[in-house]
Image (cartoon, coloured by chain):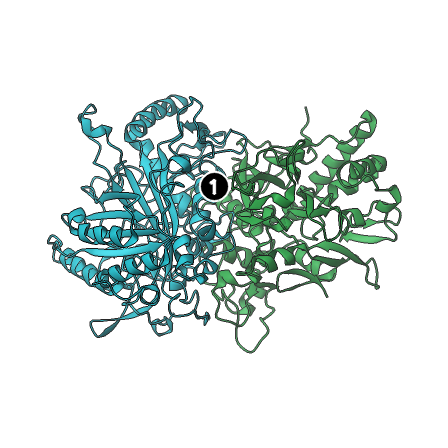
Chain colours: A green, B cyan
């Protein structure tokens, strides 16, 4: 049987067999082409990233985990938990313009591939339910293309019975990404039931499956600093490479794991690496004992995966189980009363899965760093500050040199002529779309 | 980084078990329950003249270091050392309500130990109907009936209980209550814990300067270990961190200018855990597990091999990252901690001319073929690796100052029926930090008790606890994936399961070890 990429967690949302078959074919084509595009953009003789469309993986799943709470926001609010949780609940906006006029669309600032929404019966009332999602927008865009009615029904089941089909349609054309135009009247990934009024899937512009595949592919490129030394430290690698965001828990850890697995610092044989099928970003687990009653006794059955499966959770819900004697207003997280979704997110573990194979690929040549980072002008230690990632040779602005890792790129001119061939950078896309990094996440300009 | 930027600490204001730690042969822990302000004040006044400071303990460390360099036995001392720590009931009773505010947002100190914070079992009764000794209601110390409001930590080289008797008796009289708990700890021969491994090897070094005997000096000696990836070192494998990670009111970075009231400065939150170790089960189970693994993988693996993998070190102290097999000769102090997991370390020469050999990197670091991802030492300190919570600097920021000591007699392996083997034995775990949730809890609950963090692939089989929310509050089996040392693309690993549980908590408390200025402020007139 021919290999096919399956939907995340192999979720089975479509009932009609013919529609399902067409959807699954389309999904496979879409993911396969993302892999092909990323592989084609890797430097010559540096092909440790592969797709199972062309070669089977032979290993078991190789999980890489990270914490769900946005680390950039945590860095900006190190000693004020309430400020941190409030900041994570704010909406930003992303410009999805197709032309010259901006088209701001609402999105969350939760950038660790996990987003959440706390439902209340009244605006100032207690939280009655918190929903967490790790579902990529690409899935919902394609599902709506094949079965819009099913999308409406899923929204009604998981978000609100009040959802109407027209609520989910775009009022105008938008550019979802560089190569994906969504027409007026089609599915709106930024609809109110997925932003201001609820959550169904990821909205942060970097929280996409495309970004995951891009990150994994680019992370297979081993980098050297300006002195020729292999770059292995997580944040340096993220700064010097052309993947992800060096400030998150997720991207640097994923990239570092992929990088050291594909080409160990110990030398010796390489391993080809891919993202396990079904490709997805998943909710792994909530820490045991995280949710307790007022006496500190852990509560079982309150946090449930409602889409996906254990270890590959797409949507999770925290709510009182049937027959519970009390609601979330009596629940505590780490000795604190539950008031924000972020309290729970801080105890949620996310995961993606890689796989490896020995495809006999040569040991790739170390590539020079093609990006670098700039740090704020203060004396905080580097792990306590958020960095700006810049293409070389763009200098760090400010009165003093503020590149925290100057050894990565050395003199700008040395790096400028040694850039490897790379695809468009998703970060640049984000910037073009109107988000810019201020303290604590992506904000609209 | 220039040493001049490091803060000057008052070594006469800081309790010595925080920095540099009590390196004495014996410890004696005595706990009282009392929240009566005048009585607590009187007890503090009685204790105040006896409190052993950082300055005194560093003087002793210097003696030991000199003896080591001269290759002679460190001299024994006859003086009694004393430190203390207070529970939230005591700090509140004394009017020091600001103490609880210094802990982090989880409010661990204020709320006390609970299964949700620790990952401990929350069922008070075992499935066979017997009381669950790991449940807080049955703890030897720290249970509702043995609440710790005042913990005394005595240290001595020869007869700690006798040496401490007068002070304990006086405290009992002043507090109008007998101790709710007392227990001796002893350094075991070879400085091992009861499973046979050296404990406390890898510790962070504290930045800062002190005046000692009229001379300004660094708290942590710099031996000329080159900085790596922005991390400075004292000894090999000893990253330097700012004192605010362990002492309240001290800076957490060069830029940190925050200050606290003098009485709140130079304290530290103390996590105390009485960990009961089942030596017989550890050895028997690991022998059985190793036989199963040998059969499953087709490669011989002895019980001692597996135990070394569970710990991450051999009983001869050497790290698995430095040796593929137990080294014939024990390594020196500069080698034992010189390794990382994902990166090779080069050979180096220290300032005094000592040559230190380099160490290897794991050839398949996410699977852990050289040192398993579930090895205890990798679980709690993954060093250079990325983790679910960031990079190496984040990992360093979670580290604590560990001051544990074994209790109970050594297990007699040559005579399993020896009556001595019936005694309880384990570790009096003591760790100092300024943020319980961001240090102890991350290492304990997010990493040791988690199959898939800091890297995925197994629980900490040694110390971790697996108490899933849906298992009735009891221990469940801890699982891990074992990979043989050579890379084979078709190798999906071999599952192994550790029966619960070789180590269980049987006591403990979240406490605050105050400065001497605190004791001065909150004690009554000195009791004579």
Instruction: Give the quadrant of residue A350.
Output: top right
Residue A151 horizontal/vertical position (percent): 81, 38
Q: Quadrant of the C terminus of chain A?
A: bottom right
Q: Residue furthest bottom?
A: A399
Tell which of A247 and B220 is nearer to you: B220
Q: Residue at x 26, y 37 (%)?
A: B194
Q: Which residue is at a point 62% across and 40% down the rendered structure image?
A: A282
Residue B510 position, x and y percent, is 40, 50
Q: Position of residue B463 (x, y in %)?
A: 38, 38
Tag 1's secondary structure?
loop
State which quarter of the image contains the N terminus of chain A: top right
> In the figure, B435 relative to B460: above or below?
below
Left or right of B469? Residue B218 is left
Q: Taking the image as drawn, is residue B353 in sight?
A: no
For mark 1, what is the residue? Answer: B366
Q: Position of residue B343 (x, y in %)?
A: 41, 50
For the residue pair B195 and A135, the one nearer the viewer reads as B195
Instruction: Name the residue at 58% across, 71% down.
Output: A396
Front-lying residue, B127 or B30: B30
Position of residue A362 in the picture relative to residue B200 (left or right)? right
Look at the picture and state if B524 lies above or below A160: below
Foreground: B145 or B141?
A: B145
């Amino acid at each position: 049987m021919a290999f096919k990429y399956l939907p995340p967690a192999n979720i089975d949302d479509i009932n009609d067999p013919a529609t399902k078959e067409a959807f699954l074919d389309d999904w496979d084509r879409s993911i396969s082409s993302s892999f092909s595009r990323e592989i084609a953009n890797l430097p010559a003789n540096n092909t440790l990233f592969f797709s199972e469309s062309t070669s089977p993986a032979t290993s078991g799943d190789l999980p890489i985990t990270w914490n769900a709470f946005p680390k950039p926001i945590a860095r900006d609010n190190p000693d004020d938990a309430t400020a941190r949780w409030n900041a994570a609940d704010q909406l930003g906006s992303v410009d999805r313009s197709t032309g010259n006029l901006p088209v701001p669309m609402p999105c969350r600032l939760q950038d660790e591939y996990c987003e959440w929404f706390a439902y209340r019966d009244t605006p100032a009332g207690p939280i009655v339910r918190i929903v967490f999602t790790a579902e990529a927008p690409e899935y919902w865009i394609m599902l709506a293309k094949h079965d819009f009615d099913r999308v409406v029904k899923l929204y009604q089941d998981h978000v609100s019975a009040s959802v109407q089909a027209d609520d989910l349609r775009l009022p105008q054309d938008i550019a979802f990404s560089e190569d994906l135009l969504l027409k007026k009247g089609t599915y709106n990934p930024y609809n109110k039931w997925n932003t201001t009024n609820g959550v169904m899937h990821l909205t942060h512009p970097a929280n996409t499956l495309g970004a995951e595949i891009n990150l994994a592919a680019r992370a297979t490129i081993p980098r050297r600093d300006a002195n020729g030394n292999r770059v292995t430290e997580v944040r340096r690698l993220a700064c010097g490479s052309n993947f992800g965001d060096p400030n998150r828990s997720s991207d640097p850890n994923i990239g570092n794991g992929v990088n050291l697995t594909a080409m160990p610092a110990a030398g010796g044989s390489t391993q080809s690496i891919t993202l396990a099928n079904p490709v997805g970003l998943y909710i792994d687990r909530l820490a045991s004992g995280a949710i307790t009653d007022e006496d500190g006794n852990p509560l079982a059955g309150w946090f449930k995966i409602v889409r996906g499966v254990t270890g590959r959770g797409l949507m999770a819900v925290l709510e009182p189980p049937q027959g519970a004697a009390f609601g979330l207003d009596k629940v505590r997280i780490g000795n604190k009363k539950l008031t924000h979704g972020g309290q729970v997110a801080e105890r949620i573990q996310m995961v993606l899965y890689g796989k490896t194979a020995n495809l006999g690929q040569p040991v790739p040549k170390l590539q020079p760093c093609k990006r670098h980072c700039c740090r704020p002008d203060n004396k905080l230690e580097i792990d306590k500050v958020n960095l700006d990632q810049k293409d070389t040779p763009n200098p760090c602005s400010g009165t003093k040199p503020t590149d925290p890792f100057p050894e990565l790129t050395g003199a700008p001119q040395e790096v400028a002529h040694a850039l490897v061939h790379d695809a468009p950078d998703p970060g640049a896309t984000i910037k073009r779309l109107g988000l810019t990094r201020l303290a604590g996440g992506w904000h609209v300009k | 980084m220039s040493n001049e930027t490091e803060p000057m600490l008052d070594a006469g204001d800081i309790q010595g078990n925080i920095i540099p730690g009590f390196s004495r042969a014996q410890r004696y822990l005595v706990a009282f329950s009392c929240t009566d302000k005048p009585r607590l004040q009187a007890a503090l006044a009685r204790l105040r003249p006896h409190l052993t400071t950082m300055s005194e303990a560093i003087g002793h460390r210097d003696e030991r270091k000199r003896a080591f360099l001269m290759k002679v036995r460190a001299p024994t001392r006859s003086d009694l050392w004393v430190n203390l720590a207070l529970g939230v009931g005591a700090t509140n009773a004394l009017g020091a309500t600001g103490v609880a505010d210094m802990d982090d947002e989880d409010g661990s100190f204020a709320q006390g130990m609970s299964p949700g914070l620790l990952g401990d079992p929350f069922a008070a009764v075992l499935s066979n109907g017997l009381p669950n000794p790991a449940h807080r209601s049955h703890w030897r110390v720290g249970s509702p009936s043995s609440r710790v409001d005042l913990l005394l930590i005595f240290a001595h080289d020869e007869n700690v209980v006798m040496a401490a008797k007068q002070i304990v008796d006086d405290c009992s009289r002043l507090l109008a209550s007998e101790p709710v708990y007392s227990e001796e700890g002893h350094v075991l021969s070879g400085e091992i814990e009861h499973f046979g491994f050296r404990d406390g090897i890898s510790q962070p070094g504290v930045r800062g300067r002190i005046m000692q005997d009229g001379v300004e000096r660094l708290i942590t000696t710099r031996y000329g270990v080159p900085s790596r990836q922005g991390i400075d070192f004292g000894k090999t494998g000893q990253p330097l961190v700012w004192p605010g990670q362990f002492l309240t009111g001290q800076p957490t970075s060069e830029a940190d200018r925050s200050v606290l009231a003098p009485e709140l400065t130079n304290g530290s939150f103390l996590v105390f855990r009485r960990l009961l170790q089942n030596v017989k089960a550890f050895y028997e189970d690991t022998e059985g597990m190793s036989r199963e693994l040998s059969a499953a993988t087709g490669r011989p693996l002895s019980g001692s091999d597996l135990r070394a993998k569970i710990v991450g070190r051999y009983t001869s102290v050497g790290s698995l990252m430095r040796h593929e097999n137990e080294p014939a000769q024990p390594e020196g102090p500069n080698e034992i901690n010189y390794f990382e997991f994902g990166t090779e370390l080069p050979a180096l020469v220290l300032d005094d001319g000592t040559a230190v050999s380099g160490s290897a990197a794991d050839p398949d670091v996410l699977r852990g073929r050289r040192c398993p991802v579930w090895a205890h030492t990798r679980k709690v300190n993954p060093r250079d690796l990325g983790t679910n919570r960031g990079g190496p600097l984040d990992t360093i920021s979670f580290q604590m100052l560990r001051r544990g000591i074994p209790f109970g007699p050594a297990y007699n392996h040559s005579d399993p029926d020896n009556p001595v083997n019936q005694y309880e034995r384990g570790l009096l775990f003591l760790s100092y930090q300024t943020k319980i949730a961001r240090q102890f809890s991350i290492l304990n609950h997010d990493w040791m008790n988690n199959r898939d963090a800091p890297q995925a692939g197994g629980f900490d089989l040694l110390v971790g606890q697996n108490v899933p929310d849906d298992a009735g509050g009891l221990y469940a089996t801890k699982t891990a994936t074992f990979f043989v040392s050579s890379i084979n693309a078709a190798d999906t690993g071999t599952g192994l399961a550790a029966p619960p549980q070789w180590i269980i908590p049987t006591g403990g408390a979240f406490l605050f070890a105050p400065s001497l200025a605190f004791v001065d402020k909150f004690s009554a007139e000195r009791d004579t």
